[in-house]
Image (cartoon, helix red, strand yellow):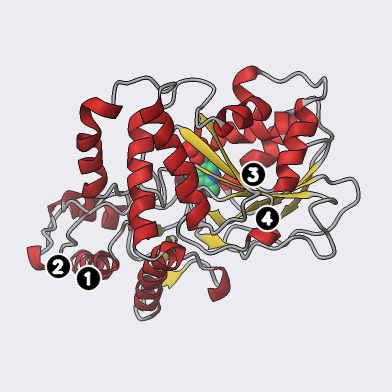
Amino acid sequence: MPADAADIIIPAELLPADGRFGCGPSKVRPEQVEALVAAGTELLGTSHRKPPVKRLVGAVRAGLTALFDLPDDWEIVLGNGGSTVFWDVATFGLVRDRSQHLVFGEFSSKFAAACAAAPHLGAPSTITADPGGHPDPVAEDGIDAYALTHNETSTGVAMHLRRPAGTTAADGLVVVDATSAAGGLHWDHTEVDVYYFAPQKCFASDGGLWLAACSPAAVERIEEIGASDRWRPASLDLKIALDNSRLDQTYNTPAVATLVMLAEQLDWMNSNGGLDFAAGRSATSASTLYGWAASRSWATPFVADPQQRSNVVGTIDIDDAIDANEVCAALRANGILDTDAYRKLGRNQLRVGMFPAIDPADIDALTRCIDHVVDQLA
Ligand SMILES: *Cc1c(COP(=O)(O)O)cnc(C)c1O
């Protein structure tokens, strides 16, 4: 028996073709890197105020509208800073006074904290569930924004997006953190007003950008707050971002390479059948991973309710007799990367990215590699 987990050698025939299983940044497909090389001297290193880069931003906006099958009156808004910055953007430009937050993990708790800290907003209402499940939104007087999380990346819980019973957008906007879900899970635009994300998860690009699909009611809210005298830092001003997005620009300089890789991923998804294709790949991977875990005595899907198990982020508890950190170390030594649990969750767990870019066959290979490692550790 090897003395050290990192000395375990996984037979080459068991290894996945690509060893990247992280939950963000996540696997970038080789074709996206080729697109970067092809963008070479015509796009990279050129002005974001000139037609070639503006066309690229336009292609991203059109690609997302097509992927999500959005009506013509929806708008794609974008800016710099990633989803974390969008939380601050939302406190300044989307929440009128009070928001309600479903808190069921690290990411969903952070937007609630941002709203609680904003001096110009009323105290948010929070509905909390223990990690491993999710609460449901409840219609509440005085709430003008309901903050949902499509996929809680820290726990592997996905939720079906629905407006609180009996409400419409006029009662409160439904504002969804879809950072790890967008492009890998289905959703119904009639149940949502703002669907925001960053491109380093299902879109397999780099971080640092936020994108938000906005309903007409959301655009109206942005205009309303934009016309008010609330102080808003310009770089976090959603009205400025909206005005720039309509011109296929960002307020300040974006990472052009991030946009190139995002556009390539959107092309790949849309030309292969759109969200049915992309979400279908994640669904296949998820059924492989959870099915495998259910068939091993030492592995259990962390999310008890199969309806709430995520197709894009799989969390698998490991029996205490086996140290999941050692399993991860052995996998890493063999080129299989980033299968660690979310650190603050503090569980003996593996967490596996199953974004559309990840080949379902590689998820199958990963399960065989874990079997091999556990067998060697025993
Ligand atoms: C990754 C993630 C974030 C943070 O995204 P950044 O772009 O790093 O700010 C927020 N919410 C969820 C659900 C995420 O998965």
Give the residue number, with chain letter if any, for mark 3. 109
Give the residue number, with chain letter if any, for mark 1. 368
| CA gap, disc 4 and disc 1 | 39 Å
User: What's the residue at 62%, 28% (across, down)?
Assistant: 243
Question: Quick one: label 1 or label 2, which is nearer the N terminus?
Answer: 2
Dots 1 and 2: beta carbons under 8 Å? yes
Where residue 208 sits, quadrant-wise, is top left
Can you give x and y, in whole percent of width and height, for residue 307 in the image?
A: 57, 73
Can residue 355 be seen from the camera position used here?
A: no
Can you give x and y, in whole percent of width and height, for residue 321 in the image?
A: 35, 66
Tag 1: amino acid: Arg
Where residue 313 sits, quadrant-wise, is bottom left
| CA gap, disc 1 and disc 2 | 6 Å
- Which label was assigned to residue 192? 4
| Up/down of 140 relative to 76, above or below | below
Tag 2: amino acid: Leu
Label 4: few (<14), some (14–19) or many (≥20) C-alpha neighbours in 10 Å: many
Tag 3: amino acid: Ser
Q: In the visual, does 265 lie left or right of 86?
A: left
- Name the element at disc 2: helix
Residue at the left extreme of this rendering: 12
Question: Quick one: label 4 or label 2, which is nearer the N terminus?
Answer: 2
Give the residue number, with chain letter if any, for mark 2. 14
